[in-house]
Image (spheres, coloured by chain):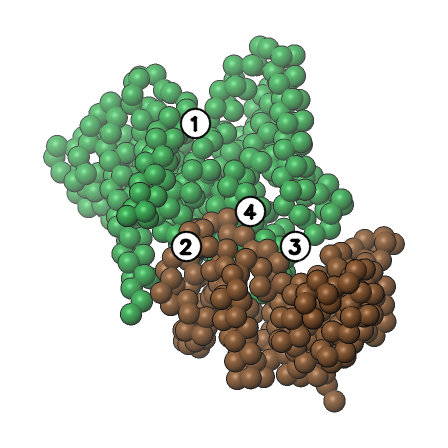
Chain colours: A green, B brown
Amino acid sequence: MNRQPDRKRLMAAVAVFITAAALILCVGTGSVRILPGEILAVIKNKLFDAELPEQITQSMAAIIWEIRMPRVFTAFAVGAMLSVSGAVMQAILQNPLASSYTMGVSSGASLGAAVIIILEISIPLLLPGAAFACGLSTVFLVLAAASSLDGTLRNSTVILFGMILSLFVSAIVTMLSAAFSQHMQRMVLWQMGTFAGRRWTHAVGLLAAAAVGTLAVSLKHRELDVMSFGDEGAAAVGVESGREKKKLLVIASLLTALSVCFTGVIGFIDLAAPHAVRRIFGASHKYVIPMSGVIGGGFMALADMLSRTVLSPQEIPVGAVTALLGAPFFLWVYFGTRRRERE
Amino acid sequence: MTYALEARNLHASYRKGGEEVLKGVDFILESGQSLGILGPNGCGKTTLLRCISGLIPFKGELKLMGDDPSGLSRREIARRASRLLQTGEAYFPYTVEETVLQGRYSKSSGIFGGITQNDREVLERVLDDLDLNAIRHKQLNVLSGGQQQKVFLGRCLAQESPVLLLDEPMNHLDIKAQSELTDHLQEWRSRQGHSLVGVYHDIRMAARLSDRIMLMKDGRTLYYGDPAGALDPGRLEETFGFDAAAFCGL
């Protein structure tokens, strides 16, 4: 009898439960410690008008509802989007090191943000809008250049053009930073990424984007599986790999561009989360895509919690925390499962 | 009569206006028959299989079960012809079962395209036939080259397409595994009525597995006919450029 799917479903349920617990922990941790019961009471109060218990003050409720929760959910959504995007890129480009960053999303977005910072225009949403537009434009440039040379979009061509354009655009950003040194600090800080000051509008918008993007990619789980074996192997079983590759590259880049434009460039999660998920759940994208979203999102929320609490009141850039925490976690998952496989 | 495959004066090149790799290939394969293709490296054997799979544009006439493959969708081609590639590489830890099930993609339908009961039945049959049951939950990357080759063949068989295109199916297999695979293929063919096109390097193996043999050289058909005629020492020497019959002990 085949018990594998049952086991995986159980593991997925456990992962969702642990992630939910991690999110509650993240909301509760900070300069003011808040218990899970108090968090639930505030949520009930805000959503269903339930009465607040006496020990919860209005300022505590505001900390939970107005500051911590939007920040934690923004971090979760961004972690989920980056991880799903990374899983897609690794599969279709058949490269364990590929990510949307390989396609130039982050360098393009950084250029867009840098131009707006230098021009000192302060119109709401202009900076994220410019970052988003430039991030996606870079990806389309990479795809156009790769298609014109090689209509079938061979993986090596896409990665090569992505890397070249990404480095080229990064060089322009560096030149701009040097030329307009009075804006350098803001540009560098933007590139480091942060979730500070994120509101419910960010959280809800990004959560919706994460959910839609993850669903759209999940519907392609069989194509992703087949394309992991290469274009010719994919064609042999009936997948229009060129067309599917373009679609998936665009969806993955959209997810990354949306994350980057609202929070800056945060690395490592997109690379490590899908690999860790594959080690736990196997290679099938039926599990890899949704679980990358869940685990990557939870991990990002934890990393953000550490970034704001370890050296409190000072914040560490969250990108540094994801790498510092992620590298040992990744090694533990990787070598742990390898040891179990040998046994 | 509709044939499994028909090729008349087939020409193909990888780039528009580029050097032709196929410069005149002709053959007709009846449904249920088996064709073995022999020829030196670079003579266009794999290119011919790619043309049949609709991956390369061509000139001349080519029909896969009565239709020009360039007018068919990728999924429809996969429903008609499955192809075992020369190399298959697993970048991620897929299990044997997951890999074989990928062969069911062209039969899937609906927005979710889930695995059906019929898919499961085909999976069980293929795993049984190829003796893969004991390793069905193993990951491909821990298997030997020969075992992996069997898994990829399983993926082809799971497609249940009437035409099987096998590019060097005996790659990585020891002689026992080659013998077993030959038996599997013969049995599968007789049971399912498949047409089989195989590219081989072993002349005896090709003769054993095939009803018809095509000898190719420089992108052209040198000989197309029964296996006995293909074993003619003069023809083999013309094809391979040396006394291949003596080398193979024919």
- Under circle 4, the secondary element is loop
Question: Callout 2, which amino acid?
Answer: Gln
State the residue position of label 3: A242
Quarter of the picture holding the N terminus of chain B: bottom right
Question: Callout 4, which amino acid?
Answer: Gln
Q: How far apart are marks 1 and 4 (CA)?
A: 25 Å
Q: Mark 4 lies on which chain?
A: A
| First reached walking from the N terminus: tag 3 or tag 4 | 4
Q: Which of marks 1 and 4 is in front?
A: 4
Residue closest to the far left = A54
Whole-percent x, y for residue B146 in the image? 50, 59
Q: Residue at coordinates 36% horizontally, 34% vertically from top-left?
A: A331
State the residue position of label 2: B139
Query: On the same chain: label 1 and label 3?
Result: yes
Query: On the same chain: label 1 and label 4?
Result: yes
Determine contact: label 1, label 2, CB under 8 Å: no
- Under circle 1, the secondary element is helix
Residue closest to the far bottom = B1
Looking at this view, is A8 or B241 the one in front?
B241
Q: Which of marks 1 and 2 is in front?
A: 2
Q: Residue at coordinates 65% horizontally, 65% vertically from top-left?
A: B202
Q: Which of marks 4 and 2 is in front?
A: 2
Residue closest to the far top = A182
State the residue position of label 1: A319
